Image: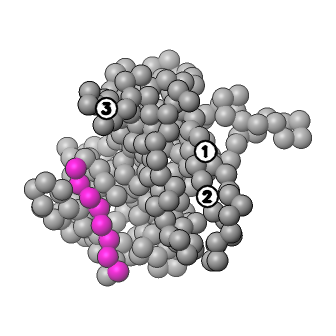
Amino acid sequence: MSSGGWLLTIGDDFVPQLIHVFSREIISLPKIYTFPEFGSTSQWHIGFRKFVLVESSSLVVVLWGCSGKLGFCRREDDEKWTAVVNGQDAMFLDITYYKGRIYSFGCNHQIQACDVSRDQNLLATNIVTVSTLPKELYGEWREGYLVHKWLSGAYIVGLENGNGLLVVIREGVYDTIQDELCSEIYKTTSFKVFKYDLDNEEWSEVKNLGSKALFVGYSQSFLMEEDSRGVIKGNCIYFTDDVSELYLRSVKGGGRDMGVYDMSS
């Protein structure tokens, strides 16, 4: 996983490390089993799902464990990880750092947030629900009721201009191709993008990213301006394979469900 030029790795000794791609600086973090009940709920190779490094406060925020819980530590300062025990009634799918807050989006279709400050026992007590994605934007009728669609994957990223967040939903179907070890072969079919304006507290669907390209997967989600040479194309979503629950059981392995989704198609 990556965030802000850093890679996060973890070995079978349960030791996570931050490695800077360019300076080659290496920082060891607390062993992952210092999370409470980690040994009974997860395994080292799926211990972390996402991480965000907040450089200004040396804060490392992660989604950990099989159930995608939130946790944090101070790099080079803390000897153990702190788990967030409140404000989590559903699995978190992605997190991002934006304008002094950690924002998350989860299986309950909610954006949640907490302030980041060295003067607080942050995250452990101050998570708040910001908003819920309206069913009218991402729902379906079932037996006469409008309900939220199931989320096969979702991401969240802050906008550089204005004061808003993008929630990106990855849609997919299961192919009929049979695998010797895994009967469910997955394939991304499309993406839906929604904007939440933090000022007027309104949702809207985004049909065009303009000259921006969006990158999603195991890394921290981010937007980038298109390249004049055509290497990076605007109004596209570049995605990598992050459905570990399926490909870990597949004889063909992961990495097959990746590509570029053109929003104009």
- Residue at the extreme left: 23
Mark 1 residue crowding within 10 angstroms, few (<14) / some (14–19) / many (20+) = few
**Residue 169: within the magenta?**
no
Q: In this view, does 261 lie to the left or right of 109?
A: left
**Residue 6: within the magenta?**
yes
- Residue at the extreme front: 229
Residue 95 to residue 211: above or below: below
* Main secondary-structure element of the magenta-colored stretch: strand
- For mark 1, what is the residue? 189
Q: Are marks 1 and 3 in contact (CB under 8 Å)?
A: no
- For mark 3, what is the residue? 230
- Label 1 element class: strand
Residue 71 to residue 118: above or below: below
- In percent of width and height, residue 174 lies at 68, 57
Mark 3 residue crowding within 10 angstroms, few (<14) / some (14–19) / many (20+) = few
- In percent of width and height, residue 61 lies at 35, 54
- For mark 2, what is the residue? 186
Residue 195 to residue 182: above or below: above
Amino acid type of disc 1?
Thr
Amino acid type of disc 3?
Gly
Q: How far, Cα to Cα, is label 1 from label 3?
A: 24 Å
- Label 3 element class: loop
In the rendered image, the quadrant that contains the C terminus is top right
Of 38 and 144, which appears nearest the observer?
Answer: 144
The span shown in magenta is 5-12
* Residue 245 image-quadrant placement: bottom right
Q: Which residue sits at x=31%, y=81%?
A: 13
Of 79 and 181, which appears nearest the observer?
Answer: 181
